[in-house]
Amino acid sequence: MPTPIAVGERSIDTVDDLAAFTGLARPIIERELRQRRAINFRNEWLATPAALRTDHWYYLSSKTYLFANATHFSDDAFVRDFVQLHVPTGARALEFGGGTGELTLRLASAGVSTTYVELNALQRDFVSFRVARHGLTDLIDVVPHWAPVPKNAFDAVIAIDVIEHLSDARRVMADVLLPSLRRDGVFVENSPFEVNASNPMHHIDFGFDRFMRNQAFALIAQHTDKTRVWRR
């Protein structure tokens, strides 16, 4: 289960936020976060009629990712190991595909001002709820997916388990994400391009590593879980 997030004197409990937002009882939410039996994004993908099973509509309307993503960053290790080591004090970050905001809130806990972008309407609404509930508007900016991403604005762009979900990943990388980085900024990603029974909604690799090298980026850190940090 996610550990509490400390932002100043505030302690943020993800399960408590989910209960307040959804109206579901805490034991129900805890059970789903642990087991993911009734709420499973693979089942939702396969249950969606084929004509509607497009990337944009599926991710925009999905209910199950609200629970699936709530346990992705259960402590502060990711921020410490992959962000703080590579950005200056008072850094500004973009979390692209930020899910339930776990990483965004943990970045705020570390003093990193973060712009959160997410296609899924339910998750984006939940993060807006969390920001308002905990008074975090000074540290977190929730941006709708249709708003333009500013160029040369961020010390870090973070996309964890996101790029492999994009049918137009090359365009998004070239036109949106990389141009938003400052000259010395870092791109932090984990992009499992495997398409299999567990992840039928993934896309195959478009040549990500070659693309990054062609854009003059080099790996400066990587982890056994395949999280990687790139810099020009």
Image (tube, rainbow, N blue to C red):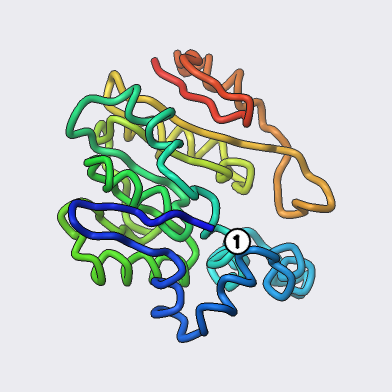
**x then y, percent, for residue 91:** 22, 33
Q: Is residue 95 above or below residue 68?
A: above
Q: Residue at x 34, y 22 (%)?
A: 86
Q: Find numbered disc 1 in the image and state the secondary structure of the residue it sits on.
A: helix
10 Å crowding of disc 1: few (<14), some (14-19), many (20+) = some
Q: Is residue 122 above or below residue 79?
A: below
For badge 1, the amino acid type reads: Ala
Q: Nearer the viewer, residue 230 or 105?
A: 105
Relative to 189, is 152 on the left or the right?
left
The furthest residue to the right? 197
**x then y, percent, for residue 168:** 58, 44
Q: Residue at x 45, y 13 (%)?
A: 216
For the N terminus, the image quarter is bottom right
Relative to 198, is 117 on the left or the right?
left
Relative to 232, is 62 on the left or the right?
right
Q: Residue at x 60, y 65 (%)?
A: 33
For the C terminus, the image quarter is top left
The residue pinned by badge 1 equals 68
Q: Residue at x 78, y 44 (%)?
A: 195
